[in-house]
Amino acid sequence: MYNTILVPIDVTEDALTNLLVPHVNSLQKLNDATVHFLAVTAPISNYLRYGGTILPGDFPDDEKQAEIILSELKEKIKLFDIPADKVKAKATVGSVKDEILATAEDINADIILLGSRRPSMSTYLLGSNAASVVRYAKTSVLVVR
């Protein structure tokens, strides 16, 4: 049923990753599925645009930034009990929602599993990444809280 599972991971949110572990492990084993882990980070321009204090010279370019989060993602993947031949990992720089949806389409994902925090005032006003993915995904989405 679920042969290709997409699991977006926020490498800065250990609690969300820990919530996903049993769900991903169960679905993977049940279906002998391939699990595609994805880490997305916003481009440096977003940090600067919203008043960030990081200077352009102090932060790596998009390619280097993706390499950094990919190495962090590979550390997080060790938490999951999935055979190495069934794991794919990718890191990108861009809009979280757009990158998740594009990757889901590229890999022909059967389901997207992602963690989400309890709604706060900012998510009520701005919306969350999970809500955006649920709203626009062309495939099933399981949000774990």
Image (spheres, helix red, strand yellow):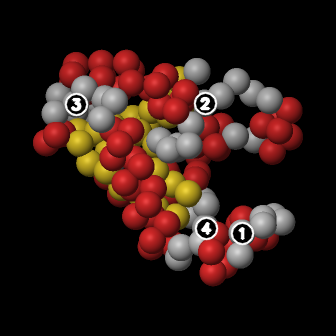
Q: Earlier in the sequence, mark 1 or mark 3?
A: 1
Residue 142 percent coordinates (x, y): 49, 27
**Residue ID at (56%, 43%):** 12
Helix, strand or loop status at disc 2: loop
Q: Disc number at residue 82?
A: 3
Camera-near label (4 vs 2) is: 4
Q: Nearer the viewer, residue 91 or 141?
A: 91
Residue to which mark 1 is pinned: 54
Residue to which mark 4 is pinned: 43
* Mark 2 vs mark 3, CA separation in Å: 22 Å
Residue to which mark 2 is pinned: 116
* Mark 2 vs mark 1, CA separation in Å: 27 Å
Residue type (three-letter) at the residue carrying disc 1: Ile
* Mark 1 vs mark 3, CA separation in Å: 37 Å
In the image, residue 63 sits, relative to residue 137, either above or below, namely: below
Residue 145 percent coordinates (x, y): 58, 21
Residue type (three-letter) at the residue carrying disc 3: Ile
Camera-near label (1 vs 3) is: 1
* Mark 4 vs mark 3, CA separation in Å: 30 Å
* Mark 4 vs mark 2, CA separation in Å: 21 Å
Q: Earlier in the sequence, mark 4 or mark 1?
A: 4
Q: Earlier in the sequence, mark 4 or mark 3?
A: 4
Helix, strand or loop status at disc 3: loop
Q: Nearer the viewer, residue 127 or 108?
A: 127
Do the residues bearing badges 4 and 2 touch, measured as CB atoms within 8 Å? no
Residue type (three-letter) at the residue carrying disc 4: Pro
